[in-house]
Image (spheres, grey):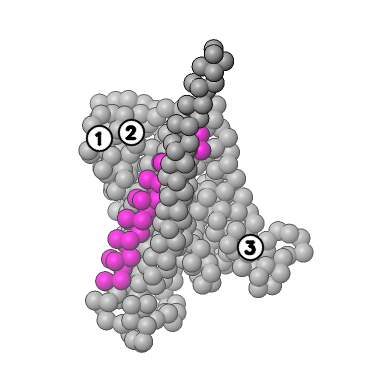
Amino acid sequence: MSRGRGRTPGLLPRTAEGPAVREGLAVGVIHFVLLIVCAVAIYLSCEWFVNAVEWLGQRLDVGKMAVGTILAAFGTALPESVVTLVAVTTGADEEAKNIGVGAAMGGPLALSTVAYGVTGGMLLLKRRRERGPEPDGSGGRATALGDAKDMRRLAKDQKWFLPIFVLKVALGLVAFAFKPVLGVLFFAAYAVYFWREIRSDDDAGEAEELEPLKLRPKAASPETWAVVVQTLATLAVIFLASQLFVRQLDAIGPMLGLSSAVTALLLSPIATELPEIMNAIIWVRQGKTQLALANISDAMMIQATVPSGLGLIFTSWKFDGALLWAGLITMAAIVYLLLTMRAHRLTPGRLTVAALFYVVFGLGLVPILA
């Protein structure tokens, strides 16, 4: 009799757990499917966006490189900038506002490591598809990423970024009364950079036949309204899909046994920088490597200045160990890239190595959060 009573309680939990487990699996599958759908939507939208932004650059009569450094980067940096703006201005408490600080630090980290690494990987794949792998396995000479002038220009962008980012991290380690006022300086720094890029004549005289506008494929010279509509519509889709992508990651993280802190610092930055990564993939596929690199470098400048300015003005801008670690890894990645650029030894293979810095960040994050 007692054994019968013992078995009955043992059966009840298993019977009750069955539907709950199936329901949990179904919810997990839905999140994964939505994650894939969002990624596809972002990629296709970015393909239409880069097509529209090239036509927009022609209409505004800006240089080819300014298309990547200013127009495209400004559009694709919108999702993460809005995340920071909403978090720091509407957060109910300091903890909620710190989500914006994490976004301001995670963006440059993902761009300087994963985005550059993916670009290098795409260049390696493209080279091997077209000519086969290099005998020495180096991934090709530095000219594969552009000539000396292209390398100087890319290095100049990183030289702008590094001191601004170092100041940004240093301010997170100190506290003083007028720190919020310094947020204005970060806006001013980007304004100067923006003006320099718009007035740059590094690519003056270069002309390139553009692909037909996807919204008007039969028009040799599409109307300006069509260019503007395609640009704004794709930006809206990129923004909404990016936000939905981040929400799926936030839901999937706990299912994989990851804490919210790990998800916020390790996975969410990849999601918010996905438009820049997709743009890089598309431009490399089209043979426009310099536009891909310029898009990443200016998106880094935006992330180093605009979200930082917002964070300084609306939060205490105080770093914990995880945020400091993110800053140190970002600086290490940029120093590595600068050294290879100055030595004229930046190849697709060495650019791919930048992604390993993100792996180091993830490994170092485990003991910090523990």
Marks 2 and 1: CB-CB under 8 Å? yes
Q: Residues within 10 Å of mark 2 (few under 14, many from 20)?
A: many
Q: What percent of the width, then of the height, locates residue 47?
A: 42, 68
Residue underneath mark 2? 98
Q: Secondary structure at mark 1?
A: loop
Please identify the residue farthest to the right as the structure is shown: 135
Q: Earlier in the sequence, mark 3 or mark 2?
A: 2
Quadrant of res 352: bottom right
Q: Is residue 244 magenta?
A: yes
Left-right relation of 334 to 315: right
From this view, report whether residue 292 is shown above or below residue 256. below
Residue underneath mark 1? 91
Left-right relation of 42 to 147: left
**Which span of residues is magenta-colored?**
229-258
Quadrant of res 362: top right
From this view, report whether residue 85 is shown above or below residue 218. above
Residue underneath mark 3? 124
